[in-house]
Each structure stands twice: as structure tokens, then as C-alpha cells.
């Protein structure tokens, strides 16, 4: 989140298309060497692409060599998004098929970009007054009405509560392990009361 990353051949690689065109008995290149041109059909929604020192715009062309040289970079906008995407098309150049100036569309695709969130915001305490009353000798289940925290960047199983002092007048246990005191539990544990 909010960082820059280089798009390398392991992320975007069209050499298999060239290999297929050169070796396939179904496709005849009439002795010509196939060349691809790649085109950005959509730019990212949550970031910016750059190719060398230029900002990528929709319709801009690039090559596999640009990717191989590490010139294609994605810059995330630091929003709390977890996914982004960019649209790509691959064209067989007209010179490759004997029609100069008339490229042949081979395919269009989407390159999905996964954003790793940064935990940069404080969790939000939903419960207005987290507390509970228990009659001596009795048990009570802690539920989300009594204790709920939310964090836009964090799933409930990753919101962890740590018990600092479990020796007061009782103990906190999981329902399926009543004889073992708990030192940690998650918001998911609370939500699944």
C-alpha cells in the first residue's frame, strides 16, 4: 500500500506467444520473424503506471523488452484498496504478417495487481462501554455487544486481544476448553459467541 513496484517478466511475459507462432505447424509466418506490440487498454484505478520516465496513458504502446529491462513500474496511491488492475492487448505487428501498418490483435487481458495493506490507522472501538457483570460462581459469554473492535485493514481473526492480568476474580476460557485460562483471543472468537 502506497509503495512502488517494478513489473518484471515473471508478472508479464509474452515470449510464449512468439515461441508458439514460430513453432506451430498451424500458423505460417511465411519466413517472417513475429514481433509483438503491447498496448495499455486500461490504466490502474488505484495507482499510476510509469514506463521509464513517462506516465502511462491509455492507448500507449510498449514492448516485452521494456518489461524485461525493468522499465514498467506501478505506483500505488496509498488508498485502502486491496486490488487494482490494468488492461493490456497484444498485437502481432503488420510487418510480421506482411501487412505493414495493419497490426493484428492477438488477445486482450487484464493484469491483476494485489495490494498488501499497511496497518496505518488505529482500530475503532465499536462498543460504547465495554464491560460486563457476572454473578459470583457463574459464567458469561463475551459477545460482540460487549466487546467489538473494527479495523478497515484487518480481518477479525487478526484483531488480537491480550489479557494482561488473568488472576483477578475469575478467568477467561474458551467454551470448548473450560479448564485452561486464555491469555489471547481474537475478535473472531468474540463474534462467534
Image (tube, helix red, strand yellow):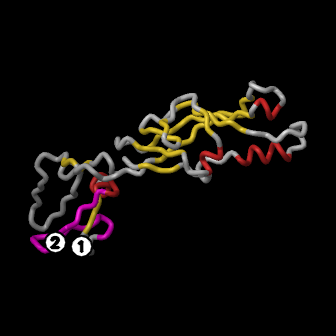
Asked whether disc 2 touches disc 1, contact meaning CB atoms under 8 Å apart, the reply is yes
Mark carried by residue 181: 1
Residue 139: x %, y % from top left: 18, 63
Residue 92 forms part of the magenta stretch:
no
Residue at image position (57%, 28%) is 59
Query: What residue span does the magenta drawing correspond to?
Result: 159-177
User: Compared to 45, does 78 lie above or below?
Assistant: below
Between 106 and 182, the one lying in front of the other is 106
Label 2 SS: loop
Residue 129: x %, y % from top left: 11, 49
Residue at image position (48%, 36%) is 55
Residue at image position (13%, 46%) is 128
**Location of residue 31 (image quadrant):** top right
Between 189 and 31, the one lying in front of the other is 31
Mark carried by residue 166: 2
Number of marks:
2
Amino acid at each position: 500500500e502506497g509503495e512502488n513496484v517494478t513489473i518484471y517478466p515473471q508478472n508479464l511475459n509474452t515470449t510464449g506467444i512468439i515461441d508458439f507462432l514460430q513453432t506451430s505447424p498451424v500458423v505460417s509466418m511465411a519466413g517472417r520473424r513475429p514481433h509483438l506490440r503491447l498496448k495499455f487498454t486500461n490504466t490502474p484505478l488505484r495507482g499510476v503506471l510509469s514506463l521509464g520516465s513517462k506516465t502511462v496513458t491509455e492507448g500507449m504502446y510498449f514492448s516485452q523488452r521494456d518489461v524485461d529491462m525493468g522499465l514498467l513500474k506501478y505506483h500505488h496511491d496509498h488508498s485502502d484498496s486491496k486490488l487494482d488492475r490494468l488492461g493490456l492487448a497484444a498485437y502481432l505487428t503488420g510487418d510480421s504478417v506482411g501487412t505493414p501498418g495493419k497490426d493484428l490483435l492477438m488477445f486482450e487481458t487484464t493484469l491483476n495487481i494485489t495490494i498488501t495493506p499497511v496497518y496505518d490507522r488505529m482500530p475503532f472501538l465499536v462498543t460504547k462501554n465495554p464491560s460486563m457483570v457476572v454473578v459470583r460462581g457463574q459464567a458469561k459469554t463475551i459477545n460482540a455487544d460487549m466487546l467489538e473492535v473494527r479495523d478497515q485493514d484487518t480481518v477479525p481473526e487478526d484483531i488480537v486481544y491480550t489479557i494482561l492480568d488473568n488472576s483477578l476474580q475469575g478467568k477467561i476460557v474458551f467454551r470448548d476448553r473450560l479448564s485452561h485460562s486464555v491469555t489471547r483471543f481474537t475478535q473472531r472468537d468474540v463474534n462467534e459467541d
